[in-house]
Amino acid sequence: MEYAVIKTGGKQYKVSKDQIIEVERLPFKEGENFSFEGVLLHVTDGAVKLGKPRVAGAAVKAAVVKHFKGDKLRISKFKAKSKYRRVTGHRQYLTRIRILDILTSVKN
């Protein structure tokens, strides 16, 4: 099984071919193809390539499926005996992407 670990939006994701994942909003249009150059780890049939900090020449090709807003988070603050109560919310902008291919050697 082939997979890679990529970094985007300050988070790391383990991805494999034809997988669909949700990441923080990316600046690409729906249907547009792009590639992640920040591949931290690449595994093919047990052969592990670990980057320091990135694997040289590796890239992950992906396509934007959809932009959307995530579920609403409800944040409440409370202090006892002082009548302090605050309730706020947050909805994160997300992008759903499909992993098209994992490339091991990219020519510049």
Image (cartoon, rainbow, N blue to C red):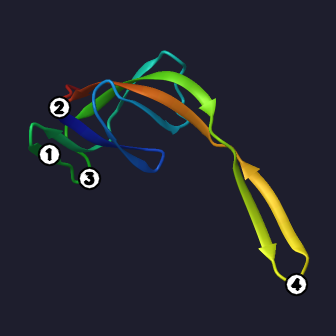
**Label 3 or label 4, whichever comes before in sequence order:** 3
Near mark 2 (Cα within 10 A), the count class, few <14, some 14-19 or many ≥20, is: some
Please give the residue where the numbered disc 2 appears in the rendered image: 104
Q: Earlier in the sequence, mark 4 or mark 1?
A: 1
Mark 3: give few (<14), some (14-19) or many (20+) Cα within 10 Å.
few
Q: How many marks?
A: 4
Quadrant location of the N terminus in the rendered image: top left
Instruction: Please name the residue shown 82% across and 81% down the image.
Output: 80
Quarter of the image for residue 58 reads: top left
Q: Is residue 14 left or right of residue 63?
A: left
The residues tagged by marks 2 and 1 sit, at their Cα atoms, a distance apart of: 10 Å
Relative horizontal placement of residue 71, taking residue 4 as reference (left or right): right
In the rendered image, which residue does mark 3 sit on? 53
Q: Give the mark nearer the N terminus: 3 vs 2.
A: 3
Q: Nearer the viewer, residue 97 or 103?
A: 97
Q: Are marks 4 and 2 in contact (CB under 8 Å)?
A: no
Q: Crowdedness of circle 4 by 10 Å Cα count: few (<14), some, many (20+)?
A: few
Give the residue number, with chain letter if any, for mark 1: 49
Quarter the C terminus occupies: top left
Q: Residue at x 16, y 30 (%)?
A: 105
**Helix or strand or loop: what does disc 4 sit on?**
loop
Q: Quadrant of residue 38?
A: top left
Identify the amino acid type marked 1: Lys
Q: CA distance from mark 4 to mark 1?
A: 57 Å
Whichever of labels 4 and 2 marks the residue nearer the N terminus, that label is 4
Disc 4 residue type?
Lys
In the rendered image, residue 91, in percent from the top left (x then y), is placed at: 68, 43
Mark 1 or mark 2, which is nearer the start of the sequence?
1
Amino acid at dot 3:
Pro
Kindly check if marks 2 and 1 are in contact, taking CB atoms under 8 A apart as contact.
yes
